[in-house]
Image: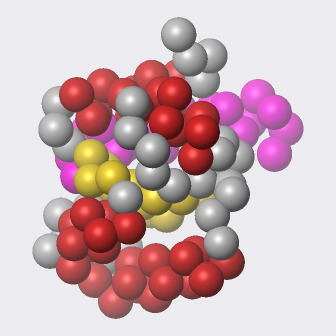
């Protein structure tokens, strides 16, 4: 099992059908204003980061965007799908995942 609780919660959100994974699906989720949280893996390119930052500002300006310390491979192990960018499309899952990410950062002293 995954040691980071937010990865476990992301896996649960995916099984519940509340996650859009991959470039196209995440962008569609933003454009349709369904996204409540945007997560980008640490090993994604600066160009992709900028593209999604612009899209998030345009479509969902009050949404939280997180660049996590985990890589695409870490997300793949946690969720069973290889993608470096994803959106969480449920407010309850998104809020809990944000809490867990913040707890992880506090525990690591970031």
| Residue 56 x/y as whole percent | 39, 78
Residue 109 point in image, percent of width and height: 85, 38
Which residue is depicted at the point 37% across and 58% down?
22
The answer to which quarter of the image holds residue 38 is: bottom left
31 magenta-colored: no
Total numbered labels = 0
Q: Residue at x 34, y 45 (%)?
A: 94
* Between 12 and 76, the one nearer to me in the picture: 76
Q: Is residue 48 left or right of residue 69?
A: left
Which residue is located at x 28 percent, y 83 percent?
59
Q: Residue at x 67, y 78 (%)?
A: 46
Name the image quarter holding residue 3. Answer: top right
Left or right, residue 61 beside residue 44: left
Quarter of the image where the C terminus is located: top right
Q: Residue furthest top?
A: 1
Hey, which quadrant is residue 95 in on the image?
top left
Q: Is residue 95 magenta?
A: yes
What are the residue bounds of the magenta stretch? 89-110
């Amino acid at each position: 099992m995954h040691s980071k609780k937010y990865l476990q919660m992301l896996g649960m959100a995916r099984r519940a059908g509340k996650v859009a994974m991959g470039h196209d699906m995440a962008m569609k989720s933003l454009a349709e204003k369904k996204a409540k949280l945007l997560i980008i893996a640490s090993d994604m390119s600066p160009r992709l980061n900028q593209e999604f930052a612009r899209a998030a500002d345009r479509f969902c300006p009050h949404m939280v965007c997180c660049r996590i310390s985990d890589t695409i491979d870490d997300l793949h192990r946690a969720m069973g799908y290889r993608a470096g960018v994803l959106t969480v499309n449920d407010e309850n899952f998104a809020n809990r995942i944000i809490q867990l990410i913040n707890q992880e950062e506090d525990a690591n002293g970031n």
